[in-house]
Amino acid sequence: MATVEKSEKVKSEEFAEIAKTIFAPIYPVLAEIILEKIPLRQGTCLDLGSGPGHLAIAMANLSDFKVISFDLSPFAQEHADENIKEAGLEEKVSTMQGDVHSLPFPDNSIDLIISRGSIFFWHNPEQVFREAYRVLKPGSYSFIGGGFGTAELKNEIVNKMEAKYGDFKSNSKKRMSPENIERLKNALAISGAPIKYMERDEANIWFVIKKEI
């Protein structure tokens, strides 16, 4: 048990450092992209698999949403708490530990769901899409996927990550392979959400759900 916990802690620390440095420029851009697609600027926003909380923080900085940084890892939540405090956003961003496959929120209670990168590690994305649809308020959206904001940022970050870790490009190709994207599209298709679609450009991919009014 101690070995597993140590491994998770080290992994969380490594990603927290990457998110705070190499990945740092993408989060405000992604938050802007999402905000441009929706009519709301306030309410409750839920960031699934939020890790150290940078996208949640960016969303809070650019809107009046109260944001919940939701992640299974207690180590990730420790980093998120530190980052939220450092940003001075304790009144706008809170952390919550839990499993994305079983969200502890009532039906029709969330105004916006966002998630970057976490989807590629979910063992049952269909269930998460189903849960996202359940907790969304009528007329609200979820944007679940991954990306780097712009093509320029993507190239810059991929090159930095490849130089530092050596296998980033190959791992990214696996996550974005046609087979994996088709698997996620199928999960969205059978999720039960009547209004759903995929958006993709050279830097980003979003699996979108809109809750009908």
Image (cartoon, helix red, strand yellow):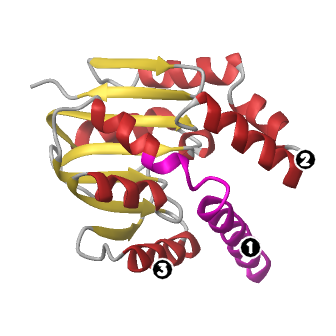
Q: Secondary structure at mark 2?
A: loop
The amino acid on which the numbered mark 2 sits, given as a three-letter code, is Gly
Which residue in the structure is indicated by mark 3?
Answer: 82
Which of discs 1 and 3 lies nearer the camera? The answer is: 3
Q: Position of residue 56 (x, y in %)?
A: 39, 57
The amino acid on which the numbered mark 3 sits, given as a three-letter code, is Glu
Image point (49%, 54%), residue name: 49
Q: Position of residue 60 (x, y in %)?
A: 30, 58
Q: Position of residue 196 (x, y in %)?
A: 34, 20
Which residue in the structure is indicated by mark 2?
Answer: 166
Tell which residue pokes out farthest to the bottom in this image: 2
Which residue in the structure is indicated by mark 1?
Answer: 10
For the record, the magenta segment spans: 1-28
Q: CA distance from mark 1 to mark 3?
A: 17 Å
Crowdedness of circle 1 by 10 Å Cα count: few (<14), some, many (20+)? few
Q: Main secondary structure of the magenta part?
A: helix
Residue 212 is at least partly visible in this image: yes
Question: For this view, does 41 lie left or right of residue 45?
Answer: left
Question: For this view, does 168 lie left or right of residue 115?
Answer: right
Identify whether 171 is placed above or below 182: below
Give the mark nearer the N terminus: 1 vs 3: 1
- Whether residue 26 is in magenta: the answer is yes
Q: Which quadrant: the C terminus?
A: top left
